[in-house]
Image: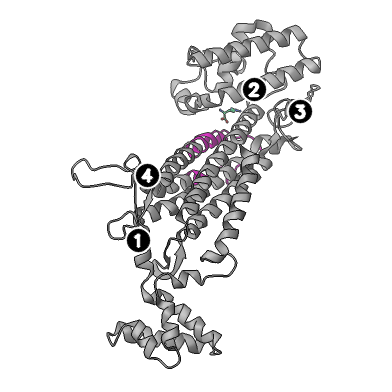
């Protein structure tokens, strides 16, 4: 078996070693990024005179052929191909002979993998950002359609105050807007080329890391070769941002589960975005929302798993770092699938605005409005809170309805009782960023403007 290191070893690697240590089963996914890195490296080697132009052309032609073989699914992996870098170098050498054997000049798989993974992360985080923006767009659209529909807002999952449905939907939207910012920040921080760092210390050959960085479209080049090959903070940070998106989706998912329950029945799912039961004919289940809730756990696991792998690693490269890829691939895939499913679900969900309003019109949800009415009249807040709290307690004790108690109370009376009429309370949430009709227009406008700006950035 011809390994990349066969010169130093008298014996072939054991089958169990290859089975345990090989990464080709998953890093095959980095083929295009690995080839891009090799292309940039070879061009640079020719520029600095380490390869002749004709040698570089041969290697570049071989890389092109490998790309075509990969696309056609005809590139054969051999038992000695432990990772994608080995595959590409072996095949380049088969195709380009002596020139191919020069491909790895001044390079290590350590800077090579760090380069490929940064290229992957940079591209995929932008794709995720575009998908998050699609969900924000759906939320904005549904918020606009919601008009002045309102529902109970909750704290502790107890009815608190009425809020506009648009306001509720945009609360999820703003969290996603920050996720897009975080994706952008993480992308900017990982936008540094490690190529040229070699195994850990750079090279005695006249390499030009600036040239490869430029060719690969990176924003900058490493300052420290050991840091360049050994840190995976950019993977951890990407996993954090993806986990947080997953957490935001899980919170939206939980509300959908709840809203679509027969007990609450504030919303119903389109058939295409619900599932049935294999046994119970009447069931319509919110599986997308449940999996959005569940997969946050897996995404958090991917993050904490990698953090544990990185903790205590000595400088510089260690094979432990190979464990960075599967969690990143998984988190990218799961977040993308989840975003796309929830975009479909949210754009087709039907809101029962009558049921929402009926729940929000319970007079007790306007208790704070009674308090604020007394405060406006000069009463100290704590005293007003006590007065209204007592009326609520007496109504719960069955003495009379809250409305009647308010009417009969000399400090409140008929005018104050009108605050308990359906739809009145939500209209009174007039402060900036509040849940009522007055501040909503500005919020919608700001949300839309931020969305348009982010779209311009992420396409
Ligand atoms: N498959 C390896 C990884 O993912 C590539 C780097 C291998 N480097 C090494 N020195 N064995 O990290």
| Mark in front: 4 vs 2 | 4
What residue is drawn where x is 49% and y is 90%?
Answer: 383
Quadrant assignment for the C terminus? top right
- Relative image position of residue 142 (x, y in whole percent): 47, 50
Closer to the chain start, of discs 3 and 2, is 2
| Mark in front: 2 vs 1 | 1
What residue is drawn where x is 49% and y is 50%?
Answer: 139
Q: Give the residue at mark 1.
A: 354
Closer to the chain start, of discs 3 and 4, is 3
Closer to the chain start, of discs 3 and 1, is 3
Q: Secondary structure at mark 1?
A: helix
Q: Give the residue at mark 3.
A: 209
Q: To which quarter of the image does residue 280 belong?
A: top left
- Report, in whole angstroms, how far the alpha carbon at label 3 lies from the one at label 1: 64 Å
Pick the front one: 256 or 209: 256
| Mark in front: 3 vs 4 | 4
Q: Give the residue at mark 2.
A: 36
Badge 3 density bin: few <14, some 14–19, many ≥20, Cα 10 Å = many
Q: Give the residue at mark 4.
A: 288
What residue is drawn where x is 58% and y is 38%?
Answer: 125
- Report, in whole angstroms, how far the alpha carbon at label 4 lies from the one at label 2: 37 Å
Question: What secondary structure is the magenta-colored segment mainly?
Answer: helix
Q: Secondary structure at mark 4?
A: helix
Disc 3 and disc 4 in contact, CB within 8 angstroms = no
- Relative image position of residue 25 (x, y in whole percent): 47, 25
Disc 4 and disc 2 in contact, CB within 8 angstroms = no
Vertically, is 12 above or below 27? above
Magenta region: 302-331
């Amino acid at each position: 078996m011809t390994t990349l290191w066969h010169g130093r070893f008298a014996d072939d690697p054991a089958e169990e070693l290859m089975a345990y240590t090989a990464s080709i089963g998953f890093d095959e996914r980095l083929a295009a990024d690995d080839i891009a890195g090799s292309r940039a490296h070879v061009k640079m080697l020719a520029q600095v005179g380490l390869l002749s132009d004709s040698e570089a052309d041969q290697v570049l032609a071989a890389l092109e052929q490998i790309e075509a073989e990969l696309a056609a699914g005809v590139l054969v992996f051999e038992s000695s191909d432990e990772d994608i870098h080995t595959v590409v170098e072996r095949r380049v050498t088969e195709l380009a002979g002596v020139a191919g054997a020069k491909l790895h000049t001044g390079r290590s798989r350590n800077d090579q993998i760090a380069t490929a993974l940064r290229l992957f992360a940079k591209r995929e985080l932008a794709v995720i950002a575009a998908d998050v923006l699609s969900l924000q767009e759906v939320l904005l659209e549904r918020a606009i359609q919601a008009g002045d529909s309102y529902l109970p807002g909750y704290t502790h999952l107890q009815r608190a105050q009425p809020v506009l449905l648009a306001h509720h939907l945009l609360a999820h939207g703003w969290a996603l807007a920050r996720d897009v910012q975080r994706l952008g920040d993480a992308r900017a921080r990982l936008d540094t080329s490690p190529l040229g760092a070699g195994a850990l210390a750079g090279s005695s050959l006249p390499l030009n890391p600036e040239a490869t960085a430029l060719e690969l479209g990176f924003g900058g080049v490493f300052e420290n070769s050991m840091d360049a090959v050994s840190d995976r903070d950019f993977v951890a940070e990407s996993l954090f941002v993806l986990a947080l998106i997953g957490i935001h989706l899980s919170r939206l998912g939980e509300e959908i589960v709840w809203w679509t329950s027969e007990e609450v029945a504030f919303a119903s799912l389109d058939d295409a975005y619900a599932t049935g039961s294999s046994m119970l004919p009447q069931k319509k289940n919110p599986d997308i929302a449940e999996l959005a809730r569940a997969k946050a756990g897996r995404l958090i696991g991917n993050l904490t798993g990698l953090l544990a792998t990185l903790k205590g690693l000595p400088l510089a490269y260690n094979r432990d770092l190979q464990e960075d890829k599967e969690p990143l691939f998984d988190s990218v895939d799961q977040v993308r699938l989840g975003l796309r499913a929830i975009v479909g679900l949210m754009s087709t969900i039907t809101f029962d605005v009558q049921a929402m309003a009926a729940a929000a019109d319970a007079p007790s949800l306007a208790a704070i409005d009674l308090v604020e009415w007394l405060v406006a009249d000069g009463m100290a807040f704590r005293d007003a809170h006590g007065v209204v709290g007592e009326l609520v307690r007496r109504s719960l004790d069955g003495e009379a309805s809250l409305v009647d108690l308010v009417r009969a109370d000399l400090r409140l009376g008929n005018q104050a009782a009108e605050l308990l009429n359906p739809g009145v309370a939500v209209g009174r949430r007039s402060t900036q960023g509040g849940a009522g009709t007055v501040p909503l227009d500005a919020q919608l406008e700001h949300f839309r403007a931020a969305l348009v700006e982010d779209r311009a950035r992420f396409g």
